[in-house]
Amino acid sequence: MTIIQTQDNMANKDTVEQFLDNNPQFAKEYYDKKVKAEVITAAFNNQVKVKEPTSYKDVSALQEAEFIFELVKEMQGTEPMEKALHKILQRIALLIQADRCSYFGCRARNGVPELSTILFDVTHNSPFNINLVNPNVEIVFPTDMGIVGWTAHSKKAQNIPDVKKDKHFSDFVDKQCKYTTKCMITAPIMNEKEPIGVIMALNKQGANEFSKSDQELFNKYVNFASVVVLLAHTASMWDIESRRSQVLLWSASKVFEELTDIERQFHKALYTVRTYIKCERYSVGLLDMTKEKEFFDEWAIKLGEQEPYKGPKTPDGREINFYKIIDYLLEDKEEIKVIPGPPADHWALVSGLPAYVAENGFICNMMNAAADEYFAFQKEAVDETGWTIKNVLSLPIVNKKEEIVGVATFFNRKDGKPFDENDEQITEALTQFLGWSTLNSDTYDKLNRTEWRKDIAQGMLMYQSTATPNDVQTILTCIRQSNIPEAKTVELHEFHFSDFPLSEFELIKCGIRCFFELGVVEKFKVPAEILTRWMYTVRKGYRDITYHNWRHGFNVGQTMFTLLLTGKLKKYYSDLEAFAMVAAGFCHDIDHRGTNNLYQTKSLSPLAKLHSSSVMERHHLEYSKTLMEDENLNIFQNLQKRQFETVQHLFEVCIIATDLALYFKKRTMFQKIVESIEGIPEEKEKVNYVSNNATRKEIIMAMMMTACDLSAITKPWEVQSKVALMVAAEFWEQGDLERTVLDQQPIPMMDRNHADELPKMQCGFIDFVCSFVYKEFSRLHTEITPMFNGLNINRGEWRALADVHEAKMKAIEDEKKKLQGGDAQGERRCLKSHSLLLILIFALSPGSHCLPHLFLLPVKMAGRQRRVLSARPPGPSEHL
């Protein structure tokens, strides 16, 4: 009976199952009505205790419903996406009896789509922490590799019964994991039309391939996985867009706070957005925007003494030179390091990646920096903190003119993963905005430069307004009607020429005579009236200051004239070049203010703001070029365009060369040229050696300007001693300004309290600066030897004065020691002795008949300050 009942039950069960299979709609309605509510209610009340299944056969509707419910609860919670996805993969492995499952995330770097392992080798009972892939060991491959890559590329599910027969199969993962893949089933997870991940199941247990029903079941759970992944993807995209908005908002805020300086502009913006970038460090390198070198920096290269630059260049042809690096260290304690002129082995530069980005303008995203073979990233810790480079994202900062102004490099994403396409987009938006924002600082800089030029021009005009047009016309008429003095009469051709016997008006006529002697007035068709007006305007351009006045300007032009003709240097130069050199000599210190470049910089004058180097010299050059722009003053107006451009270039060479800071750069090059000329036996070959090489001519020309500028040191002692006091007086005036205006202590040379050290300082100046130039010129041309001889004579005079001074000072010190503890009368005798010494040194020295005026010099003595009389030369106005 029992056997019969069992058979009946079996028959009934089979009949019911067959009926349900044939009537799926009825089965669904029955399930919805009878089972689902009960199961869910039981699950909520924890009344149903379901045994964990070990195979698909053991899975009941109740168990599956419980799994889905748990999955929904997990999706609503705060657990990471990977945990819910791990449960789904476990379920898939169980239901379709796969040996293992994996999930690959889709991303892009450097514009190339790729896949990376997120959950790997998941079985139906493997723990989550084992299957979750650490970013440091993830497997990454492009979408054109393997069946998984093809799934992402084609956006279609795949069921491969025998992977070895599939053309897309790649065994590179099998080799790494020592595993053999036989069959495979995959499906993409899509976000609209783009894949964001791929789920893969390998090797059907108990069979050679996955069946159609397996694929249907697989696809069913892939739908659940899609919901999980899409939720996480949406949250991630929201976070990314929020960060991008914050980055742009805050950087815009800081950029518009700072319009004056591009460095501060970048720094404020980059520091403010640091919390939104989510990396451990980033470094910003600012590129030098200089496109052309200064002409004097090219000399050494042209002469073969220095190798030309062979390194990388930006797309617009600039040499890649990071003049400043700003490092933002955000690992633990935040730290910012600003490194001007960073060394080549700086940790952010040593790999060569920033230079590569600056050269090509590419965005470079590298996931495993230490393993890269092209760039030499440090594998060990970069500093004492133990921090190492893992992944890198480097981007160019490009301005509106398509010029690369800097490179921003980001290191090590904080979650350990490599930078992806979204990071590229955020940082690119930031760097692009920063690049465009340079337009603000450029515009502001142009406005500032216009303002500075206006201030300079206003000062020039105010000074020049002291002479009325009627005064100028009267003097011009007088000059045209007067006889220009003969060169021999006033000794224009002599190295010992002195301007002291001549008035400033007579010097204007002498300047005109120089051009007639050169033969350039007739050759280049210079109108006499234009030449006269130009010469007078140049004289008016010089300010009425102690030394750097019109007399000094004329002396430099006259010495250039003498070097060319008497010194026989004219044979190396054309008439046009000689014309420009003498004219540049007259103009070389025009509108000098009686203070040097350092004072201009310290006082933040408009000139210093306008010119970054050789401040005064560049101002003299611009003033000189301004005269050329006026038709009524342009003595070069009848030149051809190319000739005029040559003149302008020669003016630049000559006037900038008077900056003594550049003198030491050109000394060695000049010396080698002199040595080379000495080794040439034939005169014609010597001339060709110089005249056929523009660089050699410019170096000699520049050194000639230095010799002219310092020529007072070679004049007869009665002239030199007087000029030296004029130079010293102007220096002391600057020293007074430094004390009163800048509230700084001047250097001894500028300090009138050190006036008694003048002879000693003159000896030092001759030895350190002057001696070389005149010695080398006397080697080059013996005709210039009188200048070198005059220099040595004057050095002997200054040395004698210095020795006398030192001896007297020693005697005074000895007398002071004897008088220590004595009466005030003894101290007064000591003071009187020292005062008389200074008067004797300067007023009663050889040539003292040229020093009729006296002025006060402070002297320190016995702890008190006294003022004693010393010689003062007449001011420039007294010669008129």
Image: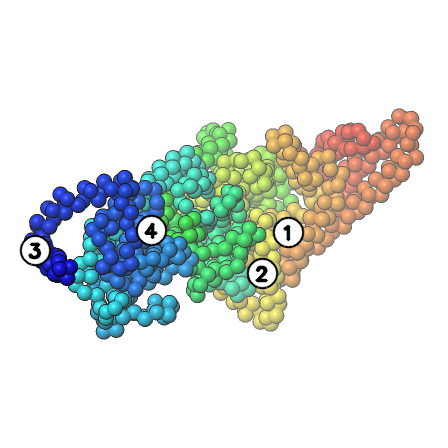
Tell me which corner region of the image, top left, top right, bottom left or bottom right, holds residue 43: top left
Q: Earlier in the sequence, mark 1 or mark 3?
A: 3
Rendered-image quadrant of the C terminus: top right
Q: Residues within 10 Å of mark 4 (few under 14, many from 20)?
A: some
Q: Earlier in the sequence, mark 1 or mark 4?
A: 4
Tell me which corner region of the image, top left, top right, bottom left or bottom right, holds residue 760: top right
Can you identify the residue that label 4 sits on?
A: 82
Circle 4 or circle 2, nearest the eye: 4
Circle 1 or circle 3, nearest the eye: 3
Amino acid type for the residue under numbered disc 2: Met
Can you identify the residue that label 1 sits on?
A: 495
Residue 108 x/y as whole percent:
31, 55
Q: Earlier in the sequence, mark 4 or mark 2?
A: 4
Residue 76 x/y as whole percent:
29, 41
Whole-angstrom CA distance, mark 4 to mark 2, is 70 Å
Q: Is residue 252 left or right of residue 10?
A: right
Q: Secondary structure at mark 2?
A: helix
Image position of 782 with respect to 805: above or below: below
Q: Residues within 10 Å of mark 2 (few under 14, many from 20)?
A: some
Contact flag, marks 1 and 2 (Cβ < 8 Å): no
Can you identify the residue that label 2 sits on?
A: 669
Residue 688 x/y as whole percent:
52, 67
Amino acid type for the residue under numbered disc 4: Glu
Amino acid type for the residue under numbered disc 1: Phe
| The one of 227 and 780 positioned closer to us in this rendering | 227
Contact flag, marks 1 and 4 (Cβ < 8 Å): no
